[in-house]
Amino acid sequence: MARMIPEDGPHHTESYGERHLYSVLKSQLPDEYTVIHSLPWLCSAVSKLDKRARPTGEIDFLIVHPEDGVLALEVKSGVYRIENSFFVHVRNGYKIDPLSQTKKNVHGFASWLGDDPALGLRIGYGFIFPDSDFDRSNIPGMYDTQSNPPQSLYIDFEAYPDVAQKIIDLMKYWKRALRNSDLGPSRTQELIDYLAPKIDGQPRWASRIRYDNKVWLQLTSEQSLVVRSVLRNKDSLITGWPGTGKTLIAIEAARKLSVEGKRVLVLSFNARLTEHIRVQLEGFRTCTVMTWHGLCRQAANALNHLSVGEEWYKVKCLEDLDIAINKGLLGEYDALVVDESQALAESWCKTLVSWFDGKPKAFFCDETQVFKFERNGVTLDGLTEILGVVAFPLSIILRMPKAVTEILSEVVPPKIQLSSPRVAEPETALEIITLTPCEELLRIKSELVAGGVGSEDIVVLTGSIIDRQYFDFLKAEKLATENIAKFRGLEAAVVIVLGAEALDTAELFSAYSRATTKFVAIYNAHNRQWKGRLDFQSRLQGKPESAAILKKAQVPLRIKNMVARCTSIRPLGMKSLDVMWAEDWGAMLVEFKAHETQLVLWVNYLSRTISHPIFIWYGDTLTKFYMVMPALNGAVESCGHYSLTMEECKSCGSLTPHSDTAKIKCALCYTVESRLLPPDQDVIDQISLYDAVITSRLPTHHTLQLRPHLPLEVAAVAALMRANKNKVRSNILLVQLPSGRNLYTTAFVFAQSRIAVCQPKKTMSVDVLADEIYYRYRELEQISPAEWRSIVASAFATFKQKGYVVRVGKKLYQPVEDVDAPVPKRYAND
């Protein structure tokens, strides 16, 4: 079956012969043949040869084959007779000259293809008369009597039943006659792509940039009204989101003031933005453009003062400016324009307003773009009070893509209703979560350049602190980047942010708003420091598709998986606690589920029983990784939990647990002596026996015999396990284990367990419970009954304070039901 273009049927035509022939060729020609029906775009080529040629001329069918070449077919439906070298339609009587028509079309077609040397072809032609019978006549120009055998160039009614084979024969004839070589598969496909290109019609990014520059980055009529308002008023305060045109209006206002002959001082905070404004005001000689600190440095120079150091930058710069103004050392100005005023301190703004008292002043402010190091900047309310005017809000966002505006509005809801006349195009604002951020950056940039975007139109933004992997990558690739804070107020056609996962809301808000045509934020799914609690990141994590990518990407980063790559692990087969032995580390490992913090009591017991280090983590955590070490403060026992991360240790030659505590650093190096000892099998057997007792895996009489000898921490865990099975209320069991001495945390869990199973309205006596526990477990014999009662009473007092019990008498409490008890705040895994 031939490949047909168009593939879903012939182009619209009144010719029944063409419609029928399309079907015949599709079904009867072999797969290697491509048939193109109707080539109307050849008309311009025909007109070059004959200015009188009709603009509607076309080739009815073009047949293409890798070996047989190219054949043009002219189809003439209806019955024709031949008279005086013309074909006369029998029914309607009109005359046609198909030979001349076809030759012109074929020659024009060949001439048109000749513009591309690779497609220069000699093309054969033929005629189809499906309704006419010429009785194999030798029609001049349509019959080659010199070939062997003679070859007819037409296929009439008699030959039409074999039309597919006749066409193949005709193509082979022309190949010999024209002495054509094979087209070959590659050249054939190139020709077909040239004749029937697939064009999706989507504007390329280069075209979109040019369009946006012309349509959205020019001063609008609405913005011109604001300019006129600034010129008309003595004092103006203009506020607005990124993209509303504040800087554009400020520049235009400065130009207009300059044209009026006024000496205009234009200030900004950002050096890069100031340079941009200076370029825009070239030619306006009465405009002086400086940064705030540039102005203050001019004052310091006039006073012969030094202008260096953090103290000068934050405080003394203003002192120098005040003195220079009072001494008249800075020249005269008639008007003041301040962009980025939110970055200036309130005292700085007061000095400027006082200096230009009675003169035109215009301040432009964007409260959404204040970085962490600018928290002491003036507020919009502060500027309103200083200037004594009401802020005029700009509400039409033109410069940045609407898709970016929608994201920013979702993350930081605006205080007023904003609008954007631009069409929302999702592809103009991409947020990519990837395992390979650096490779993704190269791919995106390469595709944009291939799409005609100039490298100068693409800006890569990073935060003030760059992750080492990004720093090394950017250095190796020699990729220029811009700091987000320094790029505030500026714009680029395409903005790409690398390392978005670690940036705060202010940085990302500013970065997103810098693009005029396309914005891309690249979030590293592998980054252990993914800031999921920040606005942009939490928004992405709330999307199912993003959450799925993150979940998959972070599997290798889970503590358990990282540890498993560094040491072989042997489970100890305990039921109440997931305890493992790290063979290569010589350490004990414990994994908790997120809600099992009370089981830390088990670990506290282990830490004072075995000499080897103990490392614990919580479920699928990426960051909550600890080393447990016993501590003794006088006679009071407790356990310290040291936060860890997995980092490379040069001494160990691999990833190992590291603490930020200076004396520990690599936890394996710090505990090397205790790790060299072989595991004490007797101790492990004893631990396993206790586990069997509290999980009911021993005969009852054996359990009762061993129960008094249980370590107190393990006994408390057993009480908690029973409470989880028989609970009357649940909220109490979700309360996190507090820090403190071992005896208190143990009493806390005993009290927690009893409150969970106590029947409604039943009164619990602290002393009765304390004595019950005291005389059940021998380990408590080391303290007096009164001391233990006091510790249990403290635990109950804590639960009363938290709202889980009410006191009904001295050391008497009743439980609070879940409907009234608070739901404890849970600590997130990461």
Image (cartoon, rainbow, N blue to C red):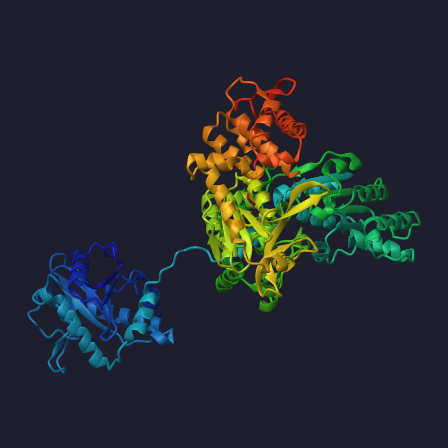
> Is 223 situated above or below 477?
above
Percent x, y for residue 85? Answer: 15, 71
x 32%, y 73%: residue: 187
Please tell me which residue lies in front, 828 or 459. 828
Name the quarter where the C terminus is drawn: top right
State the image quarter where residue 184 is shown. bottom left
Residue 331 is left or right of residue 494, and the answer is right
Residue 126 visible from this viewpoint? yes
Question: Depth check: 181 or 239 in front?
Answer: 239
The residue at 52%/33% (across/down) is 720
Can you say which quadrant of the picture contains the N terminus?
Answer: bottom left
Percent x, y of residue 286:
79, 54
The residue depicted at 24 percent of the width and 82 percent of the height is 179
Total numbered badges shown on the rendered structure: 0
Q: Nearer the viewer, residue 792 or 287?
A: 792
The image shows residue 772 at horizontal and vertical percentages of: 57, 27
Residue 704, x across and y down, in percent: 48, 34
- Residue 795, above or below 193: above
Q: Nearer the viewer, residue 761 or 550?
A: 761
Quadrant assignment, res 419: top right
Q: Classify residue 347 as left or right of residue 248.
A: right
Whether residue 830 sits left or right of residue 451 in the image: it is right
Residue 261 lies, with reference to residue 801, above or below; the image says: below
Residue 619 in view here = no
